Amino acid sequence: MRVAAIPSGVAIPGGQDLIVDLFGQFDANGHAAVGAKIPYIVRGERLRPAARAWDFAALSMAVVAADEGCPRTGSADGWTRQIELTVAVADSNFWAGQAADMARMLAFLTGDMWTLSFISGGHQPAPDKNAAWRPEDVVCLLSGGLDSLIGALDLVKKGKRPLFVSQVAKGDKRQQRVFAQTISPGSLHLQMNHNARMPHTSERSQRARSMGFFGFGALAATSLKAYEAGGRVPLVIPENGYISINVPLTPLRRGSLSTRTTHPHFLAMLQQVFNAAGLRIDIANPYQLKTKGEMLKGCLDQPRLKNLASYSTSCGRYARSGFRQCGRCVPCLVRRAAFGEWGGGDATPYRFDDLGKAGPKYRDFDDVRSAAVAVRTLNSNGIKGWVGGALNSVALAERSNLGAVAERGLREIERFLSAEGAL
């Protein structure tokens, strides 16, 4: 599919299958739209993002829209799409030179074949004379999940003042606010959403959704006083190493069928894009070599963690479960296993709580069975037999350490499933 993401008023390139109004409102013109509220939030908070950060945010929004707007059902294998994306930016010559590298990055993230091209006319708001540089010294993802809660608590305990960035999902907005106000009430908390709207049914796989956060993060990081003074700003993505690596539980889940949102190879490629663009932003995941259970046990603010942990959201099927955590998907299994390791008490009301029950809704649910198969494979064939080629990339400098955290993470799941009577 050919997709063009352009602001209103920019000439539409010919031969497009989908037109996306970039930072525009969705209406009945047959176009898609994405990022409508972002310029208003930036202006309302009196932020001063760098020009290249605006261009990167435009690219991020365009990628999210293309991911949602191109159905996988039309592809030859039912998954891999060919997407030709044209994006309007302010500095089209520079971004054209990055197109090939970014296409490879997106291919790793989504499992598709991308071709990127850039035209002029991108969104570059006039400087706001009332804007002010923000005093925070680090930007931190605050998703409403357990890992980002721990990351925020640790940063504040270390004496940092984080600017929180949340990508709003239905059901998480209030939790994000409570966490931000409790952990660092003097910090700015940006709650942003790509607000992608399609003139047809959206593709549900949405493997590129993390690009939205990185776009928001770039806008926030380049608005800090520390950045304006010439310093480098950390962009912290707290994610346990087991989920970050996301080794497929079974051979049927290989490749991009397992999400790569914070995979170290993807983050390394994204860092190269930031560096090439002159954006002084350092992507950091301090928990790359820790399991979720190890994160809970190592959190520097145990009293607040015990008060807030059960209110966090980890479920991969949260909306489909009526905004109640299902308790049986892979993220829920990792969460419940981690609580068991921690021993701090889990008051989360899971929809499917007792996984020892027989039947397809509990012990025989696909994710539970797949986790059990992974445990048996690990016990029978060792870590290399389970991981297979998942960590073979030459870009992964710490393959042995990453393999070790994957094994420890699966061992946490093994102990949980055994206690549940689900092995």
Image: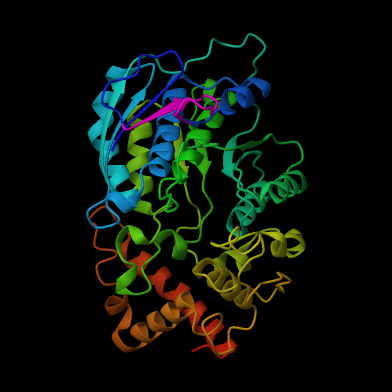
| Depicted 296 relative to depicted 412: above or below | above
The residue lying at 60 percent from left, 60 percent from top is 318
Image position, residue 17 (x, y; %): 31, 33
Residue at 42% x, 24% y is 55
Give yes or no for residue 24 being in the magenta stretch: yes
The front one of 72 and 160 is 72
Q: Is residue 169 magenta?
A: no
**Residue 304 drawn above or below residue 217:** below
User: As rendered, which of 237 and 113 lies closer to the eye?
Assistant: 113
Residue 327 coordinates in the image, percent (x, y): 60, 72
Q: Which of the image's four quarters has the N terminus?
A: top left
The quarter of the displayed image where residue 304 is located: bottom right
Main SS category, magenta section? loop
Judge left or right: residue 158 versus residue 393: right
How many numbered circles does the render carry? Answer: 0
Residue 52 on image: x %, y % = 42, 22
Residue at position x 68%, y 47% in the image:
176
Q: Position of residue 131 (x, y in %)?
A: 64, 15
On screen, residue 322 versus residue 61, left or right, reads right
Which sits in the foreground, 42 or 29? 29
Between residues 136 and 327, which one lies in front from this camera angle?
A: 327
Q: Is residue 48 above or below residue 137?
A: above
- What residue range appears in magenta? 17-32
Q: Residue at x 31, y 66 (%)?
A: 254
